[in-house]
Structure formats: structure tokens, C-alpha cells
Amino acid sequence: MTALAATSGFTNAPLWFTTRSTGLIAFVLLTLTTVLGIVATQRAMASRAWPRFATQTLHRNLSLLAVVFVLAHVVTTLADSYVQISWWSFVLPGTSSYQRWWVALGTVAFDVMAVVVVTSLLRHRLTVRTWRVVHWTSYLLWPLALLHFIGTGTDVAHNGWGLWLGVAALLVVVGGSIVRVLSPNAPRPVRSVVGSAR
């Protein structure tokens, strides 16, 4: 019955359901990206089975996938007539007539993401220090996205399970931060191949 209701709802309002689902997926991907970004710099967390470059590659690929879903979320929100949000509301915070401040948090997160993406594409033209300082601002992106998700997310307001997803995401990010703080940033000793062959 629930599946039938969801199918009927999607048929009646496909853009609204697409906006909702792309926002949800984007938030989950941003959470995973944030956790991987937090732990990827710790050499102590690397091993022969899972080297550090694998974590960094996964972090980069999930980041790009998150950008794709965020863009899909923006485009479908603009195209949907259910909520009247103008295109400049995605660039200028506080200009949306719909849930102005909650949408503004999403706008700031989107702006930060745009700056990080552009500077990452131009990384070879920037100094390492400049790129790193700009990239550190991406840590602001996730809490802004969390607040935007909680404030505007339909699944948080009506169904309640979205709130639990937000709490779970917060615990995962906090847990990753604790692991990073407690882990020494030094490579683990690697067993000698000659020694293990004896």
C-alpha cells in the first residue's frame, strides 16, 4: 500500500519527489565525503589492504557524485512549481520567499561547494597553501547542509525518519572526527616481505 501511494505520488508530482530524493541522496553523499575527508589525511589509518590514496580517490569521486546530485536538486527545485524559488535564491542567501533562512543555509552551502569545486579544478594554478585554505572551508559545507536538510526536508517535518537520518549522520561525522583526533598521524609499520617469507 505504501509503495502504491509512493508511485501514485510520484506520478502526480514527479519534480517534487525528484527534488526530495536528490536532496536526500546529496546529503548522504556529502556526509560520506566529509567523513572520508576527515580521515583521509591520517596516515595511521592506511594499510596495505587499503592504502591512503584509495581513501582519497574514493573521497574525490564521492565529492563529484555529490555535486551532480546537488545540481540535480537545484535544477528540479527551480523547475517545480510546488515551491516558488527563484534562481538567484541559489546564489544570494536570504532572497528566497519560501523558508527564507533554512533555504539560505542551503544557498551558503551551495556557494561554498562552488568555490571548492572551481579552486579544485584550478588547483595546478594555485599555491598549495591557497588551495588548502580554500578547501578547509568545505568543512563548513556539511553542517550547513545538515541544518538545511533538517529545516526544509519534508521527511524530517512530516515522516520523522529524516530527523533520525540527520542524527545518524551527525554521529558518523562526530565519530570520524574523534577517530582522527585520537589517531597519530604517522604511518603504520609495514612487515618486511623477506621477514614474512621465513
Image: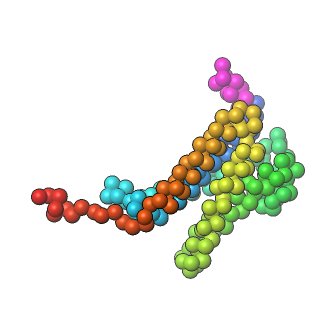
In the image, residue 105 lies at what x, y percent?
Answer: 75, 55
Rendered residue at 47%/64% (across/down): 41
In the image, residue 112 lies at what x, y percent?
Answer: 68, 63
Q: Which residues are magenta?
A: 1-11
In this rendering, position of residue 122 left or right of residue 18: left
In the image, residue 73 lies at what x, y percent?
Answer: 70, 48
Nearer to the camera, 173 or 77: 173
Does any portion of residue 125 appear in the rendered image? no
Rendered residue at 57%/78% (across/down): 129
Nearer to the camera, 91 or 79: 91
Question: In the rendered image of this protein, does residue 182 appear above or below residue 164?
Answer: below
Q: Quadrant of the C terminus?
A: bottom left
In the image, residue 122 lies at what x, y percent?
Answer: 59, 73
Rendered residue at 50%/61% (across/down): 181
Is 9 part of what is drawn in magenta? yes
Nearer to the camera, 184 or 58: 184
Nearer to the camera, 137 or 44: 44
Residue located farthest toward the right when viewing the structure as drawn: 97
